[in-house]
Every structure is written in structure tokens, then in C-alpha cells.
Image: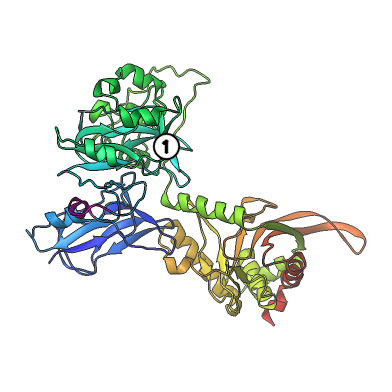
């Protein structure tokens, strides 16, 4: 019997995933434990193994595509088994940029029974005709609440293939291409160019040619629809929808007036390229302005990148004027999107304040040199800071606390998150029970985490449970900086570089070495005096590190 495999939740904050690579193809035999695919989450790219055996009968998300957790990923069953009903009934609301039906029920169930929920997505009192798909305004950014149709690239009556660009949607952040995940004929357009509607409002209807969808369009709730150029357009749209003739535009005029997220070529002309092809071009270092597209309207697609051979004469004798504007656009990774969301939430919900200190590092430098003289031993200044913080936190549990809406948690254990930079952003692996570990154990753990982070091999368990965070940019020569609290923690420590400078000792100016640290605190849990007392304790450990061994 066939088994539906859904997009797994591979981290505690994961809301959607992108298929980076399929390691199996349709028709392959699957054994329990086989790796099906590599899934890019908000934190790392992780291998996803099968818990079933059989034959891979269907793939619901192609490489480079994104879908929400618990949406259809694949189907495994017996070779030759009929899975057409499973595919048609599978939930597909989570697929990126497309909402096919009006609720979490499948399209097949919607044909039998219309939803009773009164939401912006509902089609009341109307059953969808066979093969008809309702396309609603997609949520193209995490802050998007409404979108404006900048340009329609298809008109009523046009054939639509899966992957074709339907329209360009202006969001709160950019004007972006919106591609179809369905094939059929464009039967109805719910918004004209320049009109605005809320996310999930009716955008278009796709289905078999000649299908009457007037009832579907009429009964689809249109709350939030408005026009930037004409405030009465909503009422006009309801009473007198425009004909297909009014949707026709001159292709050259459309292309001239378009603004979108597609990159430009070196001569300033627009380059049409699919998201997957763009990703492949970036990975291979291919200049897409030199690629000839074979897709619709010359759009560059996957096979064009696969078959591209750079021409040695492409740049010979070409004059490049000075002052020419050029840019590359990079689609947000899942990690980058979640980092942006979490940091914004922390910055604007937790009342941050900052405490700045400067420590004498002479004893710490001598301590590290002596410690590293031991065979097979090597610790960093960061390891010393981690250990010192762990011991200080045991004495100041208020700084080791976490804020929740209905309570404050004072942690008796110390789990220190260590921020590690990776190409896509930042990850925070956690040194568990850091106060109980030796300096060499801490050093080995941090080194192992850094290697895994660079290779995207950190597990969700290795990035969960921190009670305090340390961010160190000293190795980059940064002397002082502030960080945003890693919630629900109450504080984060920013560590700068050790700097040789004149200092006053015993009334004399001498050459010394100091290090600046800045602690960001959540004022809801850590008062100024509490944070200051913690830093005094921390100063004692760092300026006299031998006390950490007592």
C-alpha cells in the first residue's frame, strides 16, 4: 500500500523546506534508511531518510522548490501501483506562491463539499468544476499583507504550462515574478494591472478551455481588493469584469515598463530566468546574460544552464563603459529568512540595553600560553571566555534566565550558545553544561561545531536549549560591537579583539593588552545592577583565569 511522505519538520523553528537535491528518482527501489533527499531548512541542509520501503512512485516537490511542513513531498508504494487519487487528494496549500483551494481540505473533497469557513479564501455555495484551480494572491514575503499586480504576462484564453510566469506582483519589498504550478487555460483574472488585494484574495482561475467559471468568480470573497489608480475599481470589477480584449498589451510596452526581481544583462536588458536556473547558474559561476533561453518568451530554464558552454569570444573586443550600473540578485535562503524574522522579533519586542566593559588581558595571555605548552593541548581566548561566563552565570542565575509571556525561567543549568558565521548567515550551536566542562573539552566542542556548521551538518539538537549566548568578532579585528539577544535568552555577550595599547598601572603609563566586551540585556529580566554584578564576577575570572581551575 502506498505511503505519503510529507515535508518533515527538521528543526524546532522550521516552517517550510526547500529540496536541495533528490538522491532518488521516480522508479527507484527504496529501502528503509535510504537517504531520499537533502532538505534545506532555516538552519542547515540536512539528509532526509526513508522510514518506508518500496518504489518511489511520485515526487511532489522538485529540486529548488519550497513547500510548507507536512505538505506532500513524495509517495512510496508497490511498483505499478495506481496513486492518481492520492496525488489529486494531497494537501497542496503549503506549496510556495500557490494556494489551490479554499481550506486545508483537498481539491477532491472541495468538489464534493464546499467549505463552511468564512475566510478570504472561501468559495461559498459553489463547487469547483472538474479540473479548475483557484489561484489566490500569494504571500511572497514574510511581512507581505497585500500585493499589487504590476504586469500580467498571460491574458485570458492563453495556455498556461507549469512553471510559466503568470504575472509580476509588487509586494512591500520588491516586484517579483509569480509562476504557475498548474497547467491549463487562463479562464479568469480577478485583479487588473495596478489593482491591489490582500493575500489570499482571488487572483486568477485556471482550468480546462471553455469551462464556465463565472459562478466561482462571482462567489469568491474579494475583501481587501482595491485599485491604486481608481478607488471604485473593486465595485466595477464585481459588476462588469473586463473582457479578454482589455487584457491584451503590447509585448514591447510591457517589457519596457516592467520592474521585477529578475537580473539584468550587461547591456541593461532584462533577463528572464527561472528560480532553479538562477540557483544553478550561481553555483556554476555562469554569467546568465550569455545564456540563450529556450523557455517561453526566451526564459532561461534548467536545461539551458545544464547545456551552457562558455564562449571564449563572448567578451573579446566588447566595450564596457565606465560607470555602468550592474547588480546580482540572490534569493533569500531559508536560513536567511528565519534569521531576519527572529532578530527583528527580538529587537522590537525585548527592551535592549547595553553594558560596556574593558578587561586587562595580560594574565589571560600568559595563562593561555602556559596552558597550550602542554602536549596535545590548545585552547583559544574564546574558550576562556565561554568557561568564565559559564562559572559566572552559576553565581548570577538572573542573567541565565529566559523570558516568556506568562513566566520567567531561572535556569540552574548553563548551556552556552556560541555564534558561528556560515555563508548563508549565522548559526548558534550550544555547549551543554559548559560550567562542568574543562577548557580543553569546551575547545574541542566549539571546534567540532564550527566544522559541522561550515559543512551544514549541525543537527537541530546541537542548536537547541541555549540559556546565554556569546558572539566573538575579535578574530576579525573588531574592537567593540553590540549584538541582538538570542531569545528567549535574557542576554548576549559581544567579545572584541585583544588590543595592545597604553594603560595606566600603579600610576605609570605602560604597554598593556585589553579586550572590550559589550553585554546586551533584556530589561524585563536583567536590571542594570544585576548585569553589572555579573560582569564584575566575569572580570575576576578572565583577568585571573587560574581561579577557574580552583
Magenta-span inclusion, residue 107:
yes
Q: Residue at x 20, y 56 (%)?
A: 24
Q: Is residue 423 above or below residue 213?
A: below
Circle 1 residues within 10 Å: few <14, some 14–19, many ≥20:
many
Quadrant of residue 437 in the image?
bottom right
Relative side of 479 to 71, left or right: right
Q: Residue at x 29, y 21 (%)?
A: 246
Relative side of 324 to 137, left or right: right
Q: Residue at x 26, y 24 (%)?
A: 243
Q: How many marks?
A: 1
Q: Identify the image quadrant of the N terminus.
A: bottom left
Reading the image, the residue beneath label 1 is 147
Residue found at the far right of this picture: 507
Q: Residue at x 31, y 60 (%)?
A: 70
Q: Position of residue 3 (x, y in %)?
A: 18, 64
Relative side of 523 to 406, left or right: right
Q: Main secondary structure of the magenta part?
A: helix
Q: Is residue 12 above or below residue 224?
A: below
In the foreground, 384 or 465: 465
Quadrant of residue 533 in the image?
bottom right
Q: Identify the image quadrant of the C terminus.
A: bottom right
Q: Which residues are magenta?
A: 106-115
Q: Position of residue 37 (x, y in %)?
A: 27, 57
Residue found at the far bottom of this picture: 550
Magenta-span inclusion, residue 63:
no
Amino acid at each position: 500500500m502506498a505511503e505519503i511522505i510529507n515535508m518533515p519538520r527538521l528543526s524546532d523553528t522550521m516552517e517550510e523546506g526547500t529540496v536541495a537535491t533528490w538522491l532518488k528518482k521516480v522508479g527507484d527501489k527504496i529501502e528503509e534508511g535510504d537517504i531520499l533527499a537533502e532538505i534545506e531548512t532555516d538552519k542547515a541542509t540536512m539528509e532526509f531518510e526513508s522510514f518506508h520501503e518500496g518504489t518511489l512512485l511520485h515526487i511532489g516537490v522538485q529540486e529548488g522548490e519550497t513547500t510548507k511542513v507536512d505538505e506532500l513531498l513524495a509517495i512510496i508504494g508497490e511498483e505499478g501501483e495506481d496513486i492518481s487519487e492520492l496525488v489529486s487528494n494531497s494537501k497542496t496549500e503549503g506549496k510556495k506562491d500557490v494556494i489551490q483551494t479554499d481550506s486545508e481540505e483537498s481539491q477532491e473533497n472541495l468538489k464534493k463539499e464546499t467549505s463552511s469557513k468564512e475566510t478570504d479564501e472561501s468559495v461559498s455555495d459553489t463547487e469547483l468544476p472538474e479540473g479548475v484551480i483557484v489561484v489566490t494572491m500569494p504571500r511572497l514575503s514574510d511581512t507581505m499583507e497585500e500585493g499589487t499586480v504590476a504586469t500580467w504576462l498571460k491574458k485570458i484564453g492563453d495556455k498556461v504550462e507549469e512553471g510559466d510566469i503568470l504575472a509580476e506582483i509588487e509586494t512591500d519589498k520588491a516586484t517579483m515574478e509569480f509562476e504557475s504550478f498548474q497547467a491549463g487555460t487562463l479562464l479568469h483574472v480577478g485583479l487588473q494591472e495596478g489593482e491591489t488585494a490582500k493575500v489570499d484574495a482571488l487572483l486568477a482561475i485556471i482550468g480546462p478551455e471553455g469551462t464556465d467559471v463565472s459562478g466561482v468568480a462571482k462567489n469568491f470573497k474579494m475583501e481587501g481588493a482595491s485599485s491604486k489608480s481608481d478607488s471604485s475599481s473593486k465595485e466595477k470589477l464585481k459588476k462588469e469584469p473586463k473582457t479578454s480584449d482589455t487584457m491584451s498589451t503590447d509585448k514591447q510596452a510591457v517589457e519596457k515598463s516592467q520592474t521585477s526581481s529578475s537580473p539584468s544583462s550587461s547591456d541593461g536588458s532584462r533577463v528572464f530566468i527561472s528560480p532553479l536556473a538562477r540557483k544553478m547558474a550561481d553555483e556554476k559561476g555562469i554569467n546568465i546574460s550569455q545564456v540563450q533561453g529556450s523557455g517561453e518568451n526566451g526564459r532561461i530554464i534548467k536545461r539551458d544552464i545544464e547545456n551552457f558552454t562558455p564562449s571564449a569570444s563572448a567578451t573579446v573586443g566588447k566595450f564596457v563603459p565606465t560607470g555602468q550600473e550592474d547588480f546580482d540578485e540572490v534569493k533569500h535562503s531559508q536560513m536567511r529568512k528565519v534569521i531576519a524574522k527572529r532578530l527583528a522579533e527580538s529587537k522590537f519586542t525585548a527592551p535592549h540595553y547595553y553594558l560596556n566593559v574593558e578587561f586587562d588581558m595580560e594574565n589571560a595571555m600568559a595563562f593561555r600560553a602556559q596552558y597550550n605548552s602542554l602536549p596535545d593541548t590548545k585552547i583559544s581566548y574564546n574558550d576562556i571566555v565561554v568557561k568564565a561566563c559559564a562559572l559566572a552565570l552559576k553565581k548570577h542565575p538572573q542573567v541565565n534566565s529566559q523570558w516568556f509571556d506568562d513566566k520567567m525561567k531561572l535556569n540552574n543549568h548553563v548551556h552556552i550558545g556560541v555564534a558561528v558565521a556560515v555563508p548563508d548567515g549565522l548559526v548558534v550551536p550550544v555547549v551543554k553544561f559548559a560550567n562542568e566542562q574543562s577548557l580543553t573539552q569546551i575547545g574541542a566542542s566549539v571546534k567540532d561545531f564550527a566544522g559541522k556548521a561550515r559543512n551544514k551538518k549541525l543537527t537541530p539538537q546541537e542548536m537547541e536549549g541555549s540559556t546565554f549566548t556569546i558572539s566573538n568578532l575579535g578574530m576579525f579585528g573588531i574592537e567593540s560591537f553590540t549584538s541582538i539577544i538570542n531569545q528567549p535568552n535574557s542576554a548576549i555577550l559581544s567579545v572584541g579583539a585583544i588590543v595592545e595599547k597604553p594603560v595606566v598601572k600603579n600610576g605609570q603609563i605602560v604597554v598593556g593588552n585589553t579586550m572590550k566586551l559589550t553585554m546586551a540585556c533584556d530589561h524585563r529580566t536583567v536590571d542594570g545592577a544585576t548585569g553589572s554584578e555579573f560582569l564584575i564576577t566575569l572580570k575576576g575570572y578572565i583577568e585571573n583565569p587560574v581561579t577557574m581551575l580552583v
